[in-house]
């Protein structure tokens, strides 16, 4: 079994807003092992991106508080590092690919120089060495005519090519961890498939661990080794990919899977959306955050927060249906279907 490289332990993140304190991440815990892909899925507002930015220490200081928990990289707490120390880790050991490449790239700087900057800072390369490595990375991510495109500006690339440049930038220093936050959302299906294939290929060559943040379960099926499902700022279920897809144990996970189009369904077959809307975190009270939308809610769901229960090896679900004290009527299987 591969060793853990990154560990998020009972993370709580709050924001101070005009209407009061909002806890966006509430007790998130997971491990990331070398060379694996962990997909974090859930609807918008579930806390996925806040968790990722907490790892990178990219949350705004003026209104953000990590009130509890820790983030360990290689056994060392990232939360205890100075900004200089965390800046040395960013890009060199932990990198991030953001959703929109135009917000990741400096529009006034040639792409080659942007890649070279990190190499010169983190790898102590001279200008010639950094330029050669930047050229190598552009070729590796499939940029045509890479020698000339080194001196192009971001606006001179298509959306798919810009995202390739961002991936080259993120991987140039051979990071051990890559966080990809909705990396293909703005791309068409063909380019999306190319980018995902590229990430898998580079991962195999470099043994990089990937945290993939997405709401697209099709992407998860093609990329992930393990899956963490987030809702209302918490991980409600996590486990190996096959366990989550073929043996889901939380009603929210089941609802996500039922709302996903399937190729083997008859034409015109309606999808089954999850009724209602995600909760407003500012007014979220006690109990299970999914209780208002759950078809199997019980009185206890509105009163007490369910704890993680181990369903099988490496597979946990935070649901009262899985608690040993709950009568086992197995209602969750009604949602699975064939």
Image: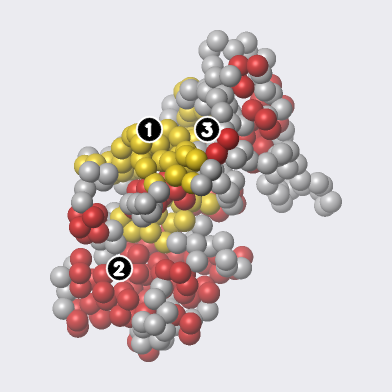
Which of labels 3 and 2 is toward the front?
3
Residue 236 has which mark? 3
Q: Judge by depth and name the residue closer to the eye, 78 or 172.
A: 78
Name the secondary structure under disc 2.
Answer: loop
Q: What is the x, y in percent for residue 253?
A: 60, 36
In this rendering, is residue 108 above or below 268? below
Q: Nearer the viewer, residue 123 or 48?
A: 48
Residue identified by numbered label 2: 172
State the residue at coordinates (20%, 73%): 120
Q: Is residue 294 left or right of residue 184?
A: right
Residue 271, compared with residue 310, is above or below; it is: below
Is any part of residue 135 visible from this angle? no
Q: Residue 274's spot in the image, x, y percent?
A: 70, 39
207 versus 193 height, above or below: above
Q: Which of marks 2 and 1 is nearer the N terminus?
A: 1
Badge 1 or badge 3: first in the primary sequence: 1
**Pointer 3: residues within 10 angstroms few (<14), some, or many (20+)?**
many
Q: In which quarter of the image is residue 149?
A: bottom left
Contact flag, marks 3 and 2 (Cβ < 8 Å):
no
C-alpha separation, residue under disc 1 versus residue under disc 3:
13 Å
Q: Could you give the CA–CA distance between mark 3 and mark 2, rounded to whole angstroms? A: 35 Å
In terms of secondary structure, where does tag 1 sit? strand
Q: Which mark is residue 10?
A: 1
**Picture coordinates of residue 60, whole percent (x, y):** 38, 54
Q: Do the residues labelled 1 and 3 touch (CB within 8 Å)?
A: no
Q: Residues within 10 Å of mark 2 (few under 14, many from 20)?
A: many
Residue 158 in view: yes
Q: Which numbered tag is attached to residue 230?
A: none
Classify mark 3: helix, strand or loop. strand
- Whether residue 279 sits left or right of residue 121 in the image: it is right
> Residue placed at 32% from the left, 76% from the top?
114
Disc on the earlier residue, 3 or 2: 2
């Amino acid at each position: 079994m591969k060793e853990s490289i990154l560990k998020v332990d009972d993370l709580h993140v709050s924001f101070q807003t005009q209407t009061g304190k909002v806890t966006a991440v509430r007790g998130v815990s997971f491990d990331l092992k070398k060379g694996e892909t962990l997909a974090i899925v859930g609807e918008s507002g579930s806390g996925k991106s806040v968790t990722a930015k907490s790892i990178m220490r990219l949350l705004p200081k003026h209104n953000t508080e990590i009130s509890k928990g820790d983030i360990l990289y290689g056994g060392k707490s990232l939360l205890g590092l100075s900004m200089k120390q965390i800046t040395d880790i960013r890009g060199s050991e932990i990198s991030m690919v953001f959703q929109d490449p135009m917000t990741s790239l400096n529009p006034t700087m040639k792409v080659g120089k942007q890649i070279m900057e990190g190499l010169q800072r983190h790898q102590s390369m001279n200008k010639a060495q950094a330029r050669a490595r930047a050229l190598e990375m552009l070729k590796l991510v499939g940029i045509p005519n890479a020698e000339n495109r080194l001196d192009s500006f971001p606006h001179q690339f298509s959306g798919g090519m810009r995202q390739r440049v961002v991936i080259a930038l993120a991987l140039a220093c051979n990071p051990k961890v890559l966080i990809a936050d909705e990396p293909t959302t703005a791309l068409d299906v063909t380019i999306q498939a190319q980018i995902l294939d590229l990430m898998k290929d580079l991962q195999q060559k470099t043994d990089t661990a990937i945290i993939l943040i997405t709401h697209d379960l099709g992407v998860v099926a093609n990329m992930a080794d393990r899956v963490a499902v987030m809702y209302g700022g918490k991980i409600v279920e996590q486990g190996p990919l096959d366990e989550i897809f073929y043996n889901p144990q939380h009603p929210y996970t089941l609802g996500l899977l039922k709302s996903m189009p399937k190729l083997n369904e008859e034409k015109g077959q309606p999808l089954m959306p999850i009724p209602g809307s995600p909760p407003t975190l500012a007014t979220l009270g006690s109990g299970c955050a999914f209780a208002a939308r759950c078809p199997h809610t019980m009185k206890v769901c509105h009163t007490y927060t369910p704890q993680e229960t181990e369903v099988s090896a490496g597979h946990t679900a935070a649901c009262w249906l899985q608690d040993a004290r709950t009568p086992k009527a197995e209602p969750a299987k009604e949602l699975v279907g064939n």
